[in-house]
Structure formats: C-alpha cells, structure tokens
Image (cartoon, rainbow, N blue to C red):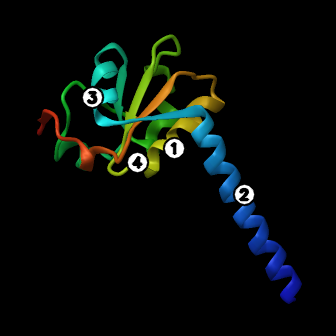
Amino acid sequence: MMEILLILSLALVVFVVYKYIKSRRILTTLTEDEFRQGYRKAQLIDIREPKEFQGGHILGARNIPLSQMRNRLMEIRKDQPIYLYCQNGARSGRAAMLLNKKGYQDIYQLKGGFKKWTGKIKKK
C-alpha cells in the first residue's frame, strides 16, 4: 500500500513538472515594458472571469475567460500574436496549453498578471 502511494505521488510530481516545462516552451513571459511594446499589434485577451474583467482591465483587451475559451476559439486568429493575461499569471499557462493544442503559435503572457499592471485600465 505504501509503495502504491509513493508511486502515485512521484507520478503526480513528474506530471506537474512536465506540464510546467511544456507551458514554458509554448508561452513567452514578458515584463510589463515588453508586453506594452507589443500588445497593440496583437490580440490582447483577458482570460479572467467577467466579474474580474468588469472590475478593471487593460485598455483594449477582449474578455475570453479560460472557462469559455474552448467554445470561443473561433474568435481568436491564428495569424496574429496572442497576448494573454489573468489575475496573477496562473491561468495563462493553462490557456496557452489549450491554444497550442489547437494549433495556435506566438503566445505571450504578462509577467505577474493584471495585479502587477501599472498602465492604463478601464472599468465598466
């Protein structure tokens, strides 16, 4: 019994590390300055939930929550860079994995997410 728990724990750790490394390979993390330089020429997508988005978002961002992304992929173009952000950076990795699996390339995220953003925001 103890061996099975040990094997399962080890498998879980290996899986988490694999997912982390894979997301880092398909997703480029940008500082706020780097993000600011490119997001106007890209698809700027806020993947937070609508209530978070309405509470404040980066000017020009579209809200496509991670929870709805699979059903709204047709709104995202494959021929333009994609700039993602969430609240703190955790959900961006999951969104990038989904997008990459569906054939999207050129995916970036804001380091630290929206809570680290110091630029202009819009509130609804």
Q: Which quadrant: the C terminus?
A: top left
Tell me which numbered mark, 4 or 2, is placed earlier along the sequence: 2
Residue 61's disc is: 3
Tell me which numbered mark, 3 or 2, is placed earlier along the sequence: 2
Disc 1 and disc 4 in contact, CB within 8 angstroms = yes
Q: Which marked residue is nearer to the observer: mark 1 or mark 3?
A: 1
Where does residue 76 sit, x and y in percent of width and height?
Answer: 45, 21
Q: Quadrant of residue 13?
A: bottom right
Where does residue 116 sit, x and y in percent of width and height?
Answer: 26, 47
Q: Quadrant of residue 63?
A: top left
Amino acid type of the residue that numbered disc 2 sits on in the rendered structure? Phe
Tell me which numbered mark, 2 or 1, is placed earlier along the sequence: 2
Q: Is residue 74 left or right of residue 65?
A: right
**Which residue position is annotated with label 4?**
89
Q: Residue at x 84, y 74 (%)?
A: 7
Q: Residue at x 60, y 33 (%)?
A: 26
Q: Nearer the viewer, residue 15 or 29?
A: 29
Q: Residue at x 80, y 81 (%)?
A: 5
Q: CA distance from mark 1 to mark 4?
A: 7 Å
What is the crowding at mark 4: few (fewer than 14 residues within 10 Å), some, or many (at least 20)?
some
**Which residue position is annotated with label 1?**
93
Check disc 3 and report its element: helix, strand or loop. Answer: loop
Amino acid type of the residue that numbered disc 3 sits on in the rendered structure? Ala
Q: Is residue 97 above or below residue 108?
A: below
Residue 15's disc is: 2
Q: Residue at x 32, y 22 (%)?
A: 39
